Image (tube, grey):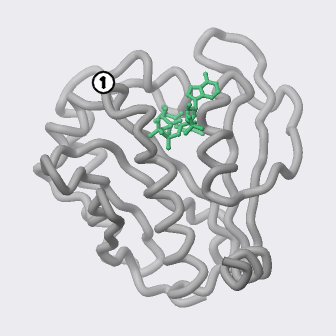
Amino acid sequence: MNFIGTKQLETERLILRKATFNDAIDAFNNWCSSDVVSKYVMWEKHKSLEETKLVYSKWMDAYKEMDTFRWVVLLKETKELIGSIDVSKKFLNFGTCEIGYCYGEKFWNHGSATETFKRVIEFLFEEVDADIIVGEHMSNNPASGKVMMKAGLKYETKLRCRVNDKFGEKNDLIVYSITKGEYYKEKCNG
Ligand SMILES: CC(C)(COP(=O)(O)OP(=O)(O)OC[C@H]1O[C@@H](n2cnc3c(N)ncnc32)[C@H](O)[C@@H]1OP(=O)(O)O)[C@@H](O)C(=O)NCCC(=O)NCCS
């Protein structure tokens, strides 16, 4: 693995860049304070802007470490902040990149999560030299599974009753992944 830190990336419609402290305001307004968005993630919705500012100041510190891969995502056209995507450090030393992402509700269903994820996959295999990229979603969140499939990941397994969702129900975790070999094979086949 090449621990080269968070590099600015672009797609046709999006800019992926390091978060700044000032992004906390838009992040709070667009997704961190949303009841709808927070239904499907492991963290609780932020109750105040101060909470988001604290998270973002920790993120700023983390950028000093070159194994930090975390971006905020902006629309090129309007410069609006629409979401964020990151790589968990849990299994990074084994070449495993576990991805998490989150987008503001008003930006859903425009293909942005898929477009971002594809670019991050390209970066992680081609520049960071990751071995495998993994995504997990709760079974009550099929849209996230759709993003994973559209980005090229394959269904791997279901971890039964692994988490409690925001409605207090036990939920399965659905696991998707793509290996380095699969990525390059797909790339060669066009
Ligand atoms: C899941 C999430 C990232 C998707 O972002 P997005 O920008 O809308 O994703 P995309 O537009 O690239 O793709 C979404 C796909 O899911 C589909 N979809 C939306 N709701 C769906 C549902 N209830 N069931 C099945 N598919 C659904 C869309 O139709 C689209 O597929 P299509 O392009 O074939 O039509 C976004 O909804 C989100 O941030 N949710 C809250 C946080 C979250 O769930 N994070 C991931 C935790 S694992």
Q: Is residue 61 left or right of residue 35?
A: left
Q: Is residue 86 left or right of residue 59?
A: right
How many labels, in total? Answer: 1
Quarter of the rendered image showing ligand 1:
top right
Residue sitting at x 75%, y 59%: 177
Determine which residue is flagged by label 1. 33
Q: Element type at marker 1?
A: loop
The three-letter amino acid code for the residue at tag 1 is Ser
Residue 112 vs 28, above or below: the answer is: below
**Location of residue 54 by image quarter:** top left
**Residue 40 placed where, x, y %?**
56, 27
How would you rate the neighbour count of disc 1 (Cα within 10 Å): few for under 14, some for 14-19, many for 20 or more? many
Q: Quadrant of the N terminus?
A: bottom right
Q: Is residue 24 left or right of residue 10?
A: left
Residue 165 vs 32, above or below: the answer is: above
Residue sitting at x 42%, y 86%: 4
**Location of residue 17 by image quarter:** bottom left
Residue farthest toward the front in the current orientation of the protein: 190
Residue 181 vs 159, above or below: the answer is: below
**Residue 174 placed where, x, y %?**
78, 39
Nearest the camera: 24 or 50?
24
Q: Is mark 1 within 8 Å of ligand 1?
A: no
**Residue 74 placed where, x, y %?**
24, 52
**Residue 104 placed where, x, y %?**
34, 32
Q: Quadrant of the C terminus?
A: bottom right
Nearest the camera: 56 or 10?
10
Residue sitting at x 45%, y 44%: 111
Residue 140 vs 30, above or below: the answer is: above
Residue sitting at x 30%, y 45%: 55
